C-alpha cells in the first residue's frame, strides 16, 4: 500500500507564490497581491495566507516595508534550485528525449487520478506513457493523463512523439494557462508491466511522484504519474533550521 503525505495548505500556497516569483509573474521590487486578494484568488482562509507569506518572508523571498506592503525580493542568495519533476514532466520534449512511447490511448481513469482531475471513477481519460532511457538503461516511466474534453483539437492522441512538451502544446492550442503544480511522493511495489519496462530486479520498489498541474483556479489540467526505480535514486534536500 502506498502512503502519501500532502503538504499543508499554507506550504502549497507559499510554493505557488514562489513559483510566480521565479517565472516573473511577481518581479523583484513589486508588491505581491494583498491578503484579501490572495484569499479571494486561492479560496483559502486568511490565517493560511498569512502563514504562507510569513514562510516566504522567513526564507528571504519577500519582505515587509512600512507603509508600502509586502515586496518581492526575488530568489534568496544561496538557495539552490531543487529537482522539480513536475516542471520537467510538463516541459519534456518527447521527440528530443531518449526513450520511447509505450502507450497512447483512452483508458479507464485510475482512482487517484480521478480524484485529482475531479472525474467519476467510470470516466475515461487519455494516457500518454513514455519510457525515459539514459545510457541504454530505463530510468523513468511517465504516465500522463488528460481529461477527454481537453484533448480535442490537439495532437495528444497521436502515436508520434510530441514536440515541445505538453504544457506548451496545450497552452497554444487550447488557450489555457498552467499556473502551479503539486507533487505527491509515495513508494510501492511495481506491477508486472512496470517491472518489465523498467527492467527491475525482483523485490525492488518504485518511487511514484504524482504530478498534478493546475490552472490559477485550481482546476487540474494534467496528472502525471512518474515512476522511478528506488534502487537508482538518491534524494537530497537542503533546508534552514529555525
Image (cartoon, rainbow, N blue to C red):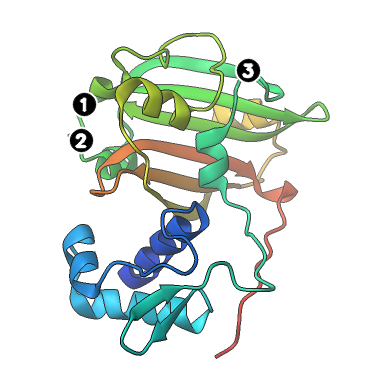
Q: Residues within 10 Å of mark 3 (few under 14, many from 20)?
A: some
The residue to which callout 3 is attached is 95
Question: In x, y percent, where is residue 73?
Answer: 51, 73
Q: Is residue 81 above or below residue 220?
A: below
In the image, taking residue 164 as reference, residue 72 lies left or right, namely left
Q: Earlier in the sequence, mark 1 or mark 3?
A: 3
Q: Residues within 10 Å of mark 1 (few under 14, many from 20)?
A: some
Q: Secondary structure at mark 3?
A: loop
The answer for how far apart the CA atoms under marks 2 and 1 are is: 6 Å
- Furthest-top residue in this view: 159
Q: Secondary structure at mark 1?
A: loop
- Furthest-right residue in this view: 135
Question: In x, y percent, where is residue 68?
Answer: 33, 81
The residue to which callout 2 is attached is 119
The answer for how far apart the CA atoms under marks 1 and 3 are is: 29 Å
In the image, taking residue 8 as reference, residue 130 lies left or right, namely right
Amino acid at each position: 500500500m502506498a502512503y502519501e503525505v500532502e503538504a499543508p495548505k499554507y506550504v502549497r500556497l507559499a510554493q505557488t507564490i514562489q513559483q510566480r516569483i521565479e517565472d516573473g509573474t511577481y518581479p523583484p521590487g513589486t508588491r505581491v497581491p494583498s491578503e484579501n486578494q490572495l484569499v479571494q484568488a486561492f479560496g483559502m482562509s486568511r490565517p493560511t495566507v498569512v502563514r504562507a507569506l510569513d514562510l516566504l518572508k522567513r526564507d528571504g523571498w519577500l519582505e515587509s516595508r512600512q507603509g508600502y506592503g509586502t515586496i518581492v525580493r526575488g530568489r534568496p542568495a544561496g538557495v539552490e534550485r531543487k529537482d522539480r519533476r513536475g516542471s520537467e514532466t510538463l516541459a519534456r520534449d518527447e521527440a528530443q528525449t531518449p526513450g520511447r512511447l509505450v502507450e497512447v490511448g483512452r483508458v479507464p481513469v485510475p482512482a487517484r487520478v480521478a480524484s485529482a482531475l475531479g472525474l467519476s471513477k467510470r470516466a475515461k481519460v487519455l494516457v500518454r506513457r513514455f519510457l525515459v532511457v539514459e545510457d541504454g538503461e530505463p530510468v523513468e516511466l511517465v504516465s500522463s493523463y488528460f481529461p477527454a474534453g481537453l484533448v480535442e483539437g490537439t495532437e495528444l492522441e497521436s502515436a508520434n512523439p510530441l514536440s515541445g512538451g505538453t504544457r506548451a502544446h496545450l497552452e497554444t492550442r487550447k488557450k489555457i494557462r498552467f499556473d502551479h503544480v503539486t507533487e505527491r511522493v509515495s513508494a510501492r511495489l511495481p506491477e508486472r508491466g512496470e517491472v518489465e519496462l523498467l527492467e527491475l530486479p525482483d523485490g525492488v520498489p518504485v518511487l511514484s511522484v504524482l504530478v498534478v498541474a493546475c490552472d490559477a483556479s485550481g482546476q487540474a489540467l494534467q496528472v502525471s504519474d512518474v515512476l522511478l526505480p528506488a534502487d537508482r535514486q538518491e534524494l537530497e534536500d537542503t533546508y534552514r533550521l529555525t
